[in-house]
Amino acid sequence: MGSALLTEGLSEAQRFLRLMEKGADELEFSIPEVRLRVPDAVKSLLASFNTTEEHSTTHVIAEDRKASSENNQQNDNKNNNDGNEGAAAAAAAAAAVAVTLNKEEEEEKKPKKKKPSSHTIPTNDEQLMLLTKKLIEIRTILLSIDHNETLKLPSIVVVGSQSSGKSSVLEAIVGHEFLPKGNNMVTRRPIELTLIHTPGEDEDYGEFPQLGLGKIHDFKKVQKTLFDLNMAVPESECVSDEPIELRIYSANVPDLTLIDLPGYIQISNRNQPEMLKHKIEELCDKYIREPNIILAVCAANVDLANSPALRASRRIDPLGMRTIGVITKMDLVAPEVGVGILRNSDYPLHLGYIGVVCRSPGDSLRTNSSAVIKHEQDFFHQHLMYNQRDIHVGTGTLRQKLMHVLEQSMGRSLYGIVDAVQLELEETRYQFKVQYNDRRVTAESYVAETIDSLKHNFKDFAGQFGKPQVRHEIADLNKASPDDFYWLYKVDLAAAALTKSGIGRMTTQLVVDVLMNNMERLTHAEQFQHHPDTQKQIMNFTSEIMRSKFLTTSDQVENTIKPYKYEVEVTDSEWSEGVKRSILLLEKELAMCDQMANNIKNAVGKSKLKAAIRHVLDADREDTRRQERLQQLAKDGNGSSEDYIYEDDDVKPIYNPRLIEKAKEALFLRDRAMILKYRLAALKSRQCKSADNKQYCPEAFLNVIAEKLTYTAVMFIQVELLNEFFFQFPREVDDRLVYQMNRRQIQQFAKENPPIAKHLALMERKTKLEEVMDKLNYLVKRQADRQEKPKPTYA
Ligand SMILES: Nc1nc2c(ncn2[C@@H]2O[C@H](COP(=O)(O)OP(=O)(O)OP(=O)(O)O)[C@@H](O)[C@H]2O)c(=O)[nH]1
């Protein structure tokens, strides 16, 4: 029916074409009268014909014949239509012929539209490649979790000797120049290339998932990155089996997984020693195992018998069931020779040979891919010998072949993958149950909990840190060392406070320091121990708040205590309180003195200490006498003071210096206690009952002043600093931490905590495996439907 229409329908072809170009969904035939739906396949076929405007009529027919013969081979069971589509296809083919014949005329009428690339993937191929596409998606999901490498997808492994044209073939398939070039062994690591077909997308780009560089639209940059990654392998190692992952997204690439490997070395030499030759062979052997498909690249001008790629494939795949022979540089041999190689009678491969030309003439470098494809098409078209039914040539044919072979291989691997994923999912579910009792956690809930606990602890602290605590801190001001005597420094403090300016700054700083220390403690609580950056951030904004409040607070304190420097009014009750506090302080210190003196006595022994004290006192007296004598001598002018310095050098000390030290301490304490007792008596005397006699009891007076200063300072510090800080801090936590975190930062924060990271990872793994399992179930069902054989589904 198709051929009849082809003959009779030529006159109508142009009419059909116009209708179809206008997007008609149906065509009405006059002979015989019948209406046909225009299938998608025909529309895309038509589109592809329209783009090959340079083709001559015969070429179009030849290409069409090839394409249809291939489609027939592979889609025998698929094309069970009632013949209408076949008829329409024939009509479309006729229309295409007509288009070519009238192309100039038509060209003028057509609106100029963007030319689809010579690499355009027909819509029906997208459907054919669904399994590959979905399995690539599934692999991407699995790669994002820590899985057991269960999913080894079949890939096409490109092997061949150096300069056989591997890179040129790969670039022709991809349609971009992106592989590193150079003579110095530029492929040193396997390049695992995943092509992802993105129908309807305008942009082509590459991605290195291991590097996280994002989309790279400039393929020169892809090339440079690959070059750098390869060159990073030291020359001493020559090759590394650590693969480089590269993904290329384009509307013009089919979904394929390809692996480029270093070229076999034919003859070893000084630069390429035997050891390197073996290393490359081992690397290739590792990759050409099942289920991978071997793309054995051989140059047409080199005897196939010498091809290491074919030799390696024969060892491992003797019938060539998963080896495709790619003969490059077909332009370098006469067509008869070329055809002879492609007929493969000497080295038969089940999947056969395909001849390609991947370089346009005069180019030292591979140029833009359309020029290469065009040159290739012209080349094979020129030599009619290549237009034979059992001869397969052209990059387009190779792409088609790869797609179909890979899809079939994916189909064979599907059930193994399903089993492996199912096992992994069961194990993960079990782990989740055992380790976490199926308890779910999210990064968001973890962040919320951590921040809540910070706020909670902060609230507790704020509740406990009020005026009494600030007062306590300020009362400790100027405490130089814990060994100082309390009474003394309290008096000093009061005196200094009276005379020194800067007390506002000092007291504020003291409270700020205490607050900062407490904040340091809160941020170093358990829940923040895994988040050093957040700790830093909290401390940064805490000190920012402090800084913003510092000057106002210290100025306020300073201003309000200024009047005390000139006049301090003391009421009777303030005075008697001051006296009481002073008495308490002195008594406290007296008790401390006694305690320390007792300690020394107990440690040294009573009589020993007594003797040592006597010795110290004698020595003191002797010293005083000596000083007096020296002064007298100096005054009389008899001799120099130096004459006497070493006078007693011969006298050996009879006491251990540490004992002498202790004796001196005991003496000091004794004197101190005496003074304290004397002062206590004064404070308790009638003279100290009234503030009018403050000159007799300065410690009571200073105490009253210190008290007043502390009270004032505390009041302002609380209002200006504490209250403000306690109010502002929780708001800053929300603003700077909670609201500013985006999803990625929330995830990152949660993952900083190893137990949470582990929990999240297991959950993510489970979710993703379940997602993968759903997708696999769909594919299994689809495969089963296609093969009309029921297959089991998995949970
Ligand atoms: N004439 C002709 N030259 C080609 C063809 N394909 C590749 N070449 C040239 O052959 C040389 C080697 O090609 P490549 O694609 O770099 O070969 P390769 O196998 O990747 O080389 P290595 O990476 O060095 O192992 C280059 O100069 C190409 O331009 C072809 O079909 N015809």
Image (cartoon, helix red, strand yellow):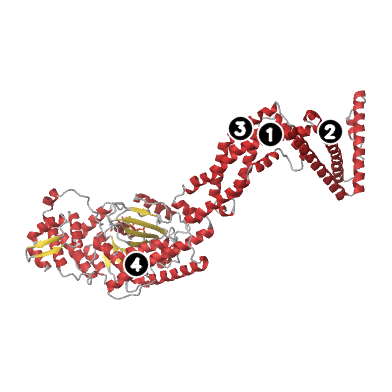
Disc 3 packing (10 Å; few <14; some 14–19; many ≥20):
some
Q: Position of residue 245 (x, y in %)?
A: 40, 58
Q: Nearer the viewer, mark 1 or mark 4?
A: 1
Name the residue beneath numbered marker 4: 294
Circle 2/circle 3 CB separation < 8 Å: no
Q: Residue furthest bottom?
A: 789
Image quadrant of residue 422? bottom left
The residue depicted at 47 percent of the width and 70 percent of the height is 427
Name the residue beneath numbered marker 3: 556
Amino acid type assigned to the residue bearing label 1 in the image: Leu
Name the residue beneath numbered marker 2: 686
Residue 385 appears left or right of 211: left
Q: Quadrant of the C terminus?
A: bottom left
The residue depicted at 22 percent of the width and 71 percent of the height is 76
The residue depicted at 13 percent of the width and 48 percent of the height is 108
Disc 1 packing (10 Å; few <14; some 14–19; many ≥20):
many
Nearer-the-camera pick, 119 or 447 = 447
Q: Position of residue 346 (x, y in %)?
A: 28, 72
Disc 4 packing (10 Å; few <14; some 14–19; many ≥20):
many
Circle 2/circle 1 CB separation < 8 Å: no
Image quadrant of residue 612? top right
Q: Secondary structure at mark 3?
A: helix
